[in-house]
């Protein structure tokens, strides 16, 4: 609710406990548990970005890669987007390509991002780079 009202400072303290607590309680990663964790980590990163706490947003995605292995492709994709927005084309390409390798369903959403990185940023120098 705090995010919906753009009260970013209030929303962040509410979100971090959710993904970590869900991981501690869950015996198995059901689809509902994974979905809840994804939503919580996305919310945490979103709130951090809105507060211009970019390192905090990055840390949320990196933690999510470890804590929610069933959604690794999603979080690699999100890190790719995060790094692209932050002007880090090599990191962005690495994570976008990793997302596609883990789940080919990310190929289509990643395509315009990687094309932009290859043609309009220093990432164009990384055209032949393979992770």
Image (cartoon, helix red, strand yellow):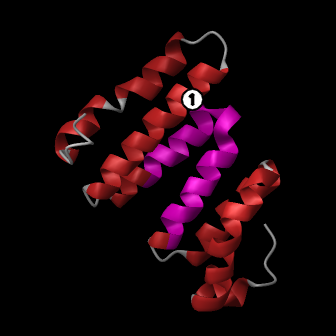
Secondary structure under tag 1 reads helix
Q: Is residue 4 left or right of residue 23?
A: left
Q: Residue at x 18, y 38 (%)?
A: 10
User: Which residue is at a point 51% across and 10% down the rendered structure image?
Assistant: 25
In front: 53, or 104?
104
Q: Quadrant of the C terminus?
A: bottom right
Q: Is residue 83 above or below residue 63?
A: below
* Picture quarter with the N terminus: top left
Which residue is drawn at the image coordinates 28% and 61% (left, top)?
A: 52
Does residue 85 show up? yes
Residue 40 screen position, x and y as percent: 44, 33
Q: Is residue 62 part of the magenta span, yes or no? A: yes
Is residue 97 in view from this perspective?
Answer: no
Image x and y of residue 49, in percent: 34, 57
Reply above or below: 131 against 37: below
Task: State the residue at coordinates (67%, 89%).
Answer: 124
- Queried whether the magenta region covers residue 71, the answer comes back as yes
* Left or right: 131 as drawn, with respect to 59: right
Which secondary structure is most common in the magenta stretch? helix
Q: Quadrant of residue 119?
A: bottom right
Magenta-highlighted residues? 58-84
Question: Residue 74 appears at what percent x and percent y?
Answer: 63, 47
**Residue indicated by mark 1:** 35
């Amino acid at each position: 609710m705090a995010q919906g009202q753009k009260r970013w400072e209030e929303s962040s303290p509410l979100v971090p406990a959710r993904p970590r607590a869900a991981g501690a309680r869950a015996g198995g990663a059901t689809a509902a548990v994974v979905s809840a964790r994804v939503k919580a980590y996305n919310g945490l990163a979103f709130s951090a970005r809105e507060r211009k706490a970019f390192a905090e947003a990055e840390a949320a995605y990196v933690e999510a890669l470890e804590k929610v292995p069933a959604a690794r492709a999603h979080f690699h994709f999100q890190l790719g987007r995060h790094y692209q927005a932050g002007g880090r084309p090599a990191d962005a390409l690495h994570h976008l390509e990793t997302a596609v390798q883990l789940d080919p369903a990310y190929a289509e959403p990643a395509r315009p991002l990687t094309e932009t990185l290859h043609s309009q940023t220093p990432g164009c120098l990384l055209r032949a780079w393979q992770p």
